[in-house]
Image (cartoon, rainbow, N blue to C red):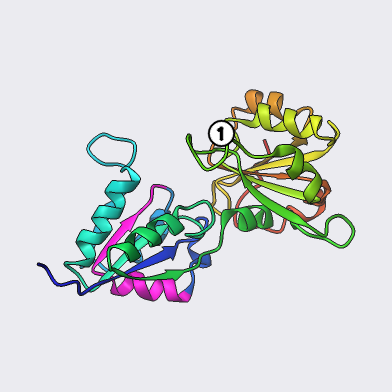
Amino acid sequence: MTEIVGKVYLVGAGPGDPGLLTLKGKVLLESADVVIYDALVSPEILAIVSPQAEQIDAGKRMGRHSLLQTETTELLIQKAREHAVVVRLKGGDPFIFGRGGEEMEDLIAAGIAVEVVPGVTSGIAAPAYAGIPLTHRNYSSSVVFVTGHEMAGKYRPGVNWSAIAQCAETIVVYMGVRNLDRITQELIVAGLTEETPIALVRWGTTPAQQELIATLGTIVERVEVAQFGAPSIAVIGNVVKLHETLGSWYVDRAPKNA
């Protein structure tokens, strides 16, 4: 039986801007034997990886859209039995809608040493780069993070959007563009007005960042007209109003409001 000598590091790559990668993450990328990365990890982050390291794209393989989760875990176990330092590089933060918890469970069950290196999640960074503070004393004292794209056959049938609408003054939705029509309608039925501000931030923290500002009642039509797609973060609530005065701080790019 092959002796297990390696350790897997679940590293958050952040939302795209290489300056937001943690120092610990950078050190691991520079010293890794193998880096298995997701599709949304930016080229600038991958450029930090040691030239001697094996790089494996878990987002595309043999013409398929992505590796199955079981295949990714099996690959991590295999590489950890062959190398000392294996980095599983994930966009944003490994534990925020990134399946890091699932991968860690499987690695521990297989007897593999594993460590988590948190990353800056896009749900915080993208609004910040758009000049939208998720909390503000005059607008919001609470925030909730929710996925707009759920796995079939999961532990419960769906997000309780009625509860989400009532539980926080700011709502941040990951992966919600494709289901935006249903999400906005459910929030309106739950009591939010059609005039509630909403912002979509696409390719957040990168030079290609774009923002689309609208209301719950108009956003779906605006998305269709602007052909505004994924990957995008949605921010819902009165804090979106601050974009008008705070949104120009990110001077490294030309304003790209759709």
Residue 225 in view of the camera: yes
Q: Residue at x 51, y 60 (%)?
A: 93
Residue extent of the magenta highlight: 23-39
Q: Position of residue 94 (x, y in %)?
A: 47, 59
Residue 54, by quadrant, is bottom left
Amino acid type shown at disc 1:
Gly
Residue placed most toward the observer, 70 or 48:
70
Q: Dot 1, crowdedness within 10 Å: few (<14), some or many (≥20)?
A: some
Quadrant location of the C terminus in the rendered image: top right
Regarding mark 1 in the picture, which secondary structure is present there?
Answer: loop
Q: What is the count of numbered marks?
A: 1
Residue 66, by quadrant, is top left
Magenta stretch holds residue 63 = no
Q: Position of residue 193 (x, y in %)?
A: 86, 34
In this picture, is 245 found above or below 80? Answer: above
Q: What residue did someone put label 1 on?
A: 229
Quadrant location of the N terminus in the rendered image: bottom left
Q: Residue at x 48, y 34 (%)?
A: 152
Q: Which residue lies most toward the left here?
A: 1
In this picture, is 98 found above or below 156? Answer: below
Q: Position of residue 130 (x, y in %)?
A: 68, 52
Left/right placement of residue 215 relative to residue 56 reads right
